[in-house]
Structure formats: structure tokens, C-alpha cells
């Protein structure tokens, strides 16, 4: 059986600095805190996504 998988690691800010993207956003006119706000919103909004694929009983547990 030939199977393929994907592994994703959340390493933003851990393995490389966010200073260059932050600087570029500021150059484009964003406020200095824009990157941190975007990152926090992304983490908040992405967390429930795997729960949507679970059966109701497990999905309800993820909503807590």
C-alpha cells in the first residue's frame, strides 16, 4: 500500500524572526502592531478548523 502524508509544524516566530515581515508591513502603511494582531487572530481562528471535521460528540468537546 502506497500512502502519502503531510506533516505541518507551526514554527512562525520560533525558528525565524518576524522582524523583517513586521518591517515590511510597516513600510506598506500598517501599524507597528499589525503583525502580532494578525498572528493572534490566525491562531484563534484556525484552532477550531480541525474540530469541524470530527463527529458531533468529539466536535462538541473541541468547542469548549
Image: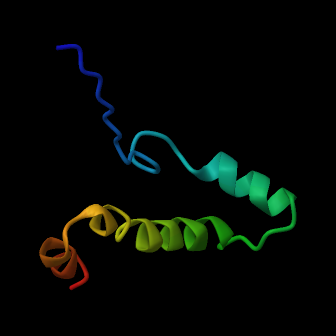
Residue at 42% from the left image edge and 74% from the top image edge: 44
The furthest residue to the top: 2
Query: Who's the residue at 29% across and 23% down the image?
Result: 4
Q: Nearer the viewer, residue 19 or 10?
A: 10
Q: Residue at x 59, y 68 (%)?
A: 38
Q: Is residue 45 left or right of residue 34?
A: left
Q: Is residue 19 above or below residue 47?
A: above
Position of residue 60 in the picture relative to residue 22 (left or right)? left
Q: Position of residue 52 (x, y in %)?
A: 33, 68
In which quadrant will I find the N terminus?
top left
Nearer to us in this view, 5 or 17 = 5
Residue closest to the far bottom: 64
Q: Quadrant of the C terminus?
A: bottom left
Which residue sits at x=25%, y=82%?
Answer: 63
Q: Where's residue 27, x and y in %?
A: 85, 57
Residue 32 x, y percent position in the rendering = 71, 70
Amino acid at each position: 500500500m502506497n500512502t502519502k502524508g503531510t506533516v505541518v509544524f507551526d514554527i512562525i516566530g520560533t525558528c525565524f524572526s518576524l522582524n523583517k515581515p513586521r518591517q515590511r508591513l510597516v513600510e506598506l502603511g500598517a501599524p507597528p502592531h499589525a503583525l502580532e494582531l494578525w498572528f493572534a487572530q490566525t491562531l484563534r481562528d484556525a484552532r477550531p478548523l480541525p474540530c469541524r471535521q470530527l463527529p458531533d460528540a468529539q466536535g462538541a468537546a473541541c468547542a469548549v
